[in-house]
Image (tube, rainbow, N blue to C red):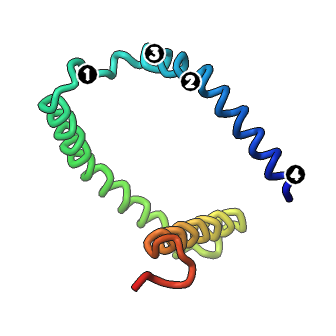
Amino acid sequence: MASKLVQLQSKACQASKFVAKHGNSYYKQLLEQNKQYIQEPATIEKCSELSKQLLYTRLASIPGRYETFWKEVDYAKNLLKNRANLKVEDAGIAALFGLECFAWFCAGEIVGRGFTFTGYYP
């Protein structure tokens, strides 16, 4: 076990050295490639305007999302009505989706409890 820890420590040290050596150039390259998205000057007013644009853009997308949700519900209802035509693949995909939803629920519960498995803090 100690040898694995030493190995892990050496890998972490190598990664840290690599980031220290190449991180700045990568950062500059990333900013250069995406400079059209950078707002200059970055003032409080500009940040406020951008946050409002994001909020109202998201609000404007709600009707489309609502319509898509009901299409998905209708599709699920149709699948339940025609269960006889349901393939094993579709049932497996649905089961995996349900399992994934349950796993995310459990992860959220653990995070909500303060990363404990036994219960909430008093």
Q: What is the number of the mark on residue 3?
A: 4
Q: Which residue is mark 3?
A: 33
Q: Which residue is mark 1?
A: 39
Which mark is in front, 2 or 1? 2
**For numbered disc 1, what is the local secondary structure?**
loop
N-term-proximal mark, 3 vs 1: 3
- Gap in angstroms between the C-alphas marked 3 and 4: 42 Å
- Gap in angstroms between the C-alphas marked 3 and 1: 14 Å
N-term-proximal mark, 4 vs 2: 4
Q: Quadrant location of the C terminus? A: bottom left
Closer to the camera, 28 or 105?
28
Residue in view at x 77 percent, y 46 percent: 8
N-term-proximal mark, 2 vs 1: 2
From the top left corner, tell me how far across and down residue 46 is, in percent: 16, 29
- Gap in angstroms between the C-alphas marked 2 and 1: 23 Å
Which mark is in front, 1 or 4? 4
Under mark 1, the amino acid is: Gln
Vertical placement of 114 versus 56: above or below? below
Callout 2: few (<14), some (14-19), or many (20+) C-alpha neighbours within 10 Å? Answer: few
**For numbered disc 3, what is the local secondary structure?**
helix
Q: Which residue is mark 2?
A: 23
Under mark 3, the amino acid is: Gln
